[in-house]
Image (cartoon, helix red, strand yellow):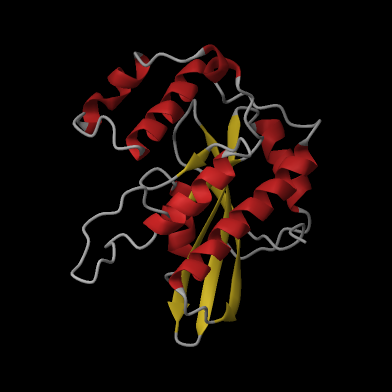
C-alpha cells in the first residue's frame, strides 16, 4: 500500500521505500525513524501530507525527509479530518514496524534520549513549564527513570502528530482555541498504548515542520 508512494523533496519517486530506508540506515545506524502527517483545506479538497523523517539524535543536525500527498474530497468536520491524520500515522508506522521487524534494532534509545522523551511527556501533562528553554537540557540530565523506562524497547518507529496537548483559551461558545486538543486527547493515548513514542506540539517536527511545509505550495 505504501511501498511505492513516497518521493524525495526533489520530486523523484522512490520505487521501494523499505529498500530505500534500509540503505539509509546502513549508513546511519543510529537514525531515528519517525512518521508524521498534517493536512490543509483548499477549496473543495482536503490535502494530507505524510512524511517519514530520519534523524540522528547523536549529531542533531537536520533530518532526511521523504513524503507523499493525498488529495481527497473535502472533509468538513474538523475532528474527522484530524482523525485521518492520526490514522495515516498509525497505518504507516504499522507498515514500517512490520517490515523492519527482525532487520532493524533501535540504537537511538540512549539513557539521555529516554530522559528527553520522558520530559516531553511531562511537558504535555503541563509540568515544568517554568523551566527556560536554555535550561531544559540540564534539567533533563537529572531526570530519574524507572527500571521499566530504562529498558522499554518501544516500537521501531516514532510518531509525530500536529496536535496540541493543551486546551488553550475557551471562547464564549465554550469552544477551545486549540481545536486539535480534542484529537490529542482521543488519539495520542491510543497510539502510545501500542508502545509508540508519540510526539505532539511543539516537538512533532515530522508533522509540524516537514509535513506543514509540504502543504504550503
Please give the name of the residue rendered at 41% of the width and 34% of the height, measured from the top-left corner. Answer: 121
Q: Is residue 9 visible?
A: no
View extreme (bottom): residue: 44
Residue 31: name its quadrant: top right
Above or below residue 148? Residue 189 is below
**Considering depth in this image, is 37 or 146 the residue closer to the camera?**
146
Quadrant position of the C terminus in the picture: bottom left
- Left or right of 151? Residue 22 is right
Residue 142: name its quadrant: top left
Please give the name of the residue rendered at 78% of the width and 54% of the height, measured from the top-left corner. Answer: 16
Please give the name of the residue rendered at 20% of the width and 67% of the height, measured from the top-left corner. Answer: 171
At which x and y percent is residue 204? 44, 46
How many numbered callouts?
0
- Left or right of 181? Residue 33 is right
**Considering depth in this image, is 38 or 87 the residue closer to the camera?**
87
At which x and y percent is residue 143? 37, 16
Q: Is residue 83 visible?
A: yes
At which x and y percent is residue 123? 33, 35
Amino acid at each position: 500500500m505504501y511501498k511505492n508512494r513516497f518521493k524525495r523533496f526533489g520530486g523523484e519517486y522512490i520505487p521501494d521505500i523499505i529498500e530505500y530506508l534500509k540503505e539509509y540506515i546502513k549508513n546511519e545506524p543510529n537514525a531515528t525513524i519517525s512518521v508524521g502527517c498534517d493536512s490543509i483545506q483548499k477549496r473543495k479538497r482536503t490535502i494530507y501530507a505524510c512524511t517519514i523523517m530520519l534523524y540522528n539524535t547523536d549529531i542533531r543536525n537536520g533530518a532526511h525527509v521523504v513524503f507523499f500527498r493525498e488529495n481527497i474530497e473535502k472533509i468538513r468536520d474538523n475532528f474527522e479530518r484530524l482523525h485521518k491524520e492520526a490514522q495515516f500515522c498509525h497505518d504507516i508506522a504499522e507498515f514500517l514496524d512490520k517490515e523492519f521487524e527482525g532487520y532493524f534494532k533501535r540504537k537511538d534509545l540512549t539513557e539521555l534520549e529516554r530522559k528527553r522523551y520522558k520530559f516531553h511527556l511531562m511537558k504535555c501533562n503541563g509540568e515544568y513549564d517554568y523551566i527556560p528553554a536554555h535550561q531544559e537540557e540540564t534539567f533533563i540530565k537529572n531526570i530519574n527513570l524507572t527500571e521499566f523506562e530504562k529498558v522499554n524497547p518501544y516500537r521501531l518507529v516514532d510518531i509525530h502528530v500536529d496536535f496540541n496537548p493543551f486546551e488553550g483559551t475557551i471562547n464564549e461558545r465554550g469552544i477551545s482555541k486549540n481545536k486539535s486538543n480534542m484529537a490529542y486527547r482521543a488519539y495520542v493515548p491510543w497510539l502510545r498504548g501500542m508502545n509508540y513514542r508519540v510526539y505532539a506540539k511543539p516537538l512533532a517536527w515530522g508533522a509540524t515542520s516537514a509535513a506543514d511545509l509540504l502543504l504550503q505550495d
